[in-house]
Image (cartoon, helix red, strand yellow):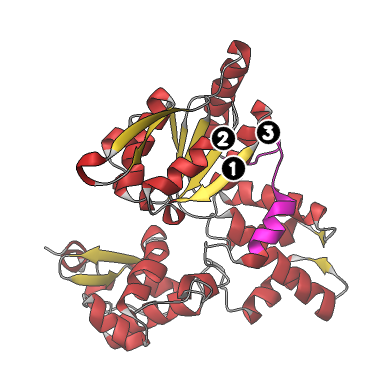
Amino acid sequence: MNRDDTTPTPAEERLVGASADREDQAVEAALRPKDLGEFIGQEKVREQLDLVLRAARARGATADHVLLSGAPGLGKTTLSMIIAAEMGAPIRITSGPAIQHAGDLASILSSLQEGEVLFLDEIHRMSRPAEEMLYMAMEDFRVDVIVGKGPGATAIPLELPPFTLVGATTRAGLLPPPLRDRFGFTAHMEFYSPHELERVVHRSASLLDVMIEPDGAAEIAGRSRGTPRIANRLLRRVRDYAQVKADGVITREIAAAALAVYEVDARGLDRLDRAVLEALLKLFGGGPVGLSTLAVAVGEERETVEEVAEPFLVREGLLARTPRGRVATPAAWAHLGLTPPQALAAGNGQQDLFGA
């Protein structure tokens, strides 16, 4: 079934979804740090990238091609803009799904200026012909433009000015090795710690002119699922609540009350997450249960449960995927305040957890 690109997916509709909607994009443009010194978190990536950029500036050369991988909302786009700013170069932004033909890529590459940064988001979704053209462009700064069709087709070499490609992907495993090998620097973006997210919340609150107390920032950070984009979104919703229901100052109590209204609990679970856990625990005794059966029980599509809800539940240690189906962990029972079956409580539920 075809879906209009403007129609939000279940992940995009969620307050704790990591995908950026138009409001997020507009706000993020104002909140983005302008250099590596302002960028919070990702300490190793920042240190390594700083060395790469400083060395390139010292040589008077363009920076090596950079590949950034990691979950949505961790700062890949922001880092690409910082790379351009640190190199004093313009940036061109596009995405893999927008490049469906080699001609699309050739048109972009041929219009680049010397030293320009080309940011290619979701690079793993680029078409294969364009991908093969990119190999030569990255390595030799040259592309072959095919003119004509059939036996009379002619390849015309087109020289390109040196440029820096910054590729971003949420699924690095889908990138073919020849493409990965052409990046001079690769980095994986990790989820943020609560302390780092507190710093993000304080910085964003300052830029948004929002009064926030340290315990209020900690409350928001603890429910942000390790993702700065979610932290900023929750901050905006709590700000709205504080302005309407209180004196505009965000305290721990105000943040907790606001996020209760939006059904985001203390661990960052929302309505869908809790529905999956409640069905698994109350209807199926903690599992194992098949994914399709679980999806029917919560009234959602199989793909929604698997791709939207499960990744965070697994990362939080609340749900396990086993060969026999989905299984709730003891932490899931504790989080929902339910009593596990006697066998599980006694520690005899290991065979279900590991599918033995």
Q: In the image shown, does 295 or 317 lie closer to the viewer?
A: 295
Badge 2 vs badge 3, beta-carbon distance below 8 Å: no
State the image coordinates of residue 277 (x, y, percent, origin top left).
Answer: 38, 77
Q: Residue furthest front?
A: 152
- Quadrant for the C terminus, please: bottom left
Q: Quadrant of the N terminus?
A: bottom left
Indicate which label's residue lies in the foreground, 2 or 3. 2
Task: Kindly tell me whether residue 75 is visible in this rendering.
Answer: no
Residue drawn 62% across and 17% down?
57
Q: Which residues are magenta?
A: 24-41
**In terms of secondary structure, where does tag 1 sit?**
strand
Residue 92 is labelled as 1
Tag 2 residue: 112
Q: Look at the image and say whether residue 198 sits in the magenta stretch.
A: no
- Residue that appears at 69% across and 32% down: 37
The three-letter amino acid code for the residue at tag 1 is: Arg
Mark 3 lies on residue:
85
